[in-house]
Image (cartoon, helix red, strand yellow):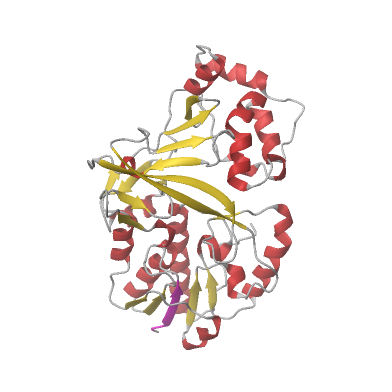
Amino acid sequence: MKKNVAIIGAGFSGAVIAHQLAKAGHQVEVFESRSHIAGNCYSERDAETSVMVHVYGPHIFHTDNERVWKFVNEFGEFMPFVNRVKAITNDRVFTLPINLLTINQFFNKTFRPAEAQQFLAEQGDKTIENPVTFEDQALRFVGRDLYEAFFKTYTVKQWGLQPSELPASILKRLPVRFNYDDNYFSHKYQGMPKDGYTAIVEKILNVPGITVHLSTPFKPEQKGDYDHVFYSGPIDAWFGHRDGRLPYRTLDFEVHRDQGDYQGNAVINYCDSAKPYTRITEHKHFSPWEQHEGTLCYFEYSRQCEEGDTPYYPIRLARDKVQLEKYVKLAQDEPNVTFIGRLGTYRYLDMDVTIDEALKVADKFLACATENAPMPAFVIDPLA
């Protein structure tokens, strides 16, 4: 039976679900409050330099998921790209993630891998048996010197919180390598869309049965006009923030244009307090197959998200769990609405995970439609 579906948000979550449902014969309307598609992955050519700009900050595609990689490659050519991040601390430049070169440079050594591993183990604080906080995790596994040089101040700038207030799980995503591999990611597939992310999303949405409404907010009271609604906005906003606003970090970008090459690399982190920004991203280096005389950089600042700001990173502290649980319960009691994506499930998601989950949500909806069964509010548990 053909369903009439509304999807709120034209980022990857909404676009992928819209694509899959429309291909299966359902009628889909996509509502986007912004004036463009692609959400925070939106990219466009800078009018002055012709550089392809990641307008809401850099996005590098990386995944081990075969289905996701095949899916995105249906809609555009992905060029090889390896993210090689540099870090400046105490007026010295290092490579990230921490690897054998970083360790040898920082400590002025010439360690072989086994020697570096033993040395770092000796630096770690063995009195911390079960790391609970970000600070515990860093001190236990890399020691105080590396922690203070690369993580402590950067974390305060990025999250607005002391590392002792953040969960250890945040640091567990950052690897330490005992070789000279400075590829920031370790996934099988890594790349950058040749024509930008906006072109990819545009093609994903280019399916008969999909209508896109830009600059058109969707109100919860409109849900009765549709058989089902998929919502990728902030979960607390759907319910009018009745239990308070869930905390996010947002980003401000100071744009700098120049001639030539500004910093010689796509991403350089500023890990100490000498600079107020967390990093500088030079966007021409995200498209190394192109040549541009001019250049464009983002000086990136992180701060607490306020009303009217663009939410980027859910903070998800332990003290926020009770508040999130209330919204999850409200969502589960909301008929014919499924909450999706980073904002709808209040979880930090990379692009590949976002697309994978969107494909699974679409699979679930199509199965439910076939069986005439109700669609759940969440396909992926946001409290897990």
Front-lying residue, 76 or 48: 48
As drawn, 116 above or below 164:
above
The mark tally for this picture is 0
What range of the chain is rendered magenta? 2-8
Task: Give the farthest residue toward the right.
Answer: 127
As drawn, 312 above or below 94:
below
Instruction: Locate the N terminus by quadrant.
Output: bottom left
At 50% from the left and 68% from the top, the residue drawn is 232
Q: Is residue 18 left or right of residue 235?
A: left
Magenta stretch: residue 89 in it? no
Q: What is the x, y in percent for residue 286?
A: 33, 43
Q: What is the x, y in percent for residue 362?
A: 44, 68
As drawn, 109 above or below 316:
above
Q: Can residue 370 be seen from the camera position used here?
A: no
As drawn, 197 above or below 287:
below
At 28% from the left and 59% from the top, the residue drawn is 75
Helix, strand or loop for the magenta stretch, by majority: strand
Front-lying residue, 69 or 159: 159
Q: Is residue 50 left or right of residue 71?
A: left
Q: What is the x, y in percent for residue 319?
A: 74, 55
At 72% from the left and 53% from the top, the residue drawn is 318
Res 180 → quadrant:
top left
At 56% from the left and 73% from the top, the residue drawn is 376
Res 164 → quadrant:
top right
Instruction: Locate the C terminus by quadrant.
Output: bottom right
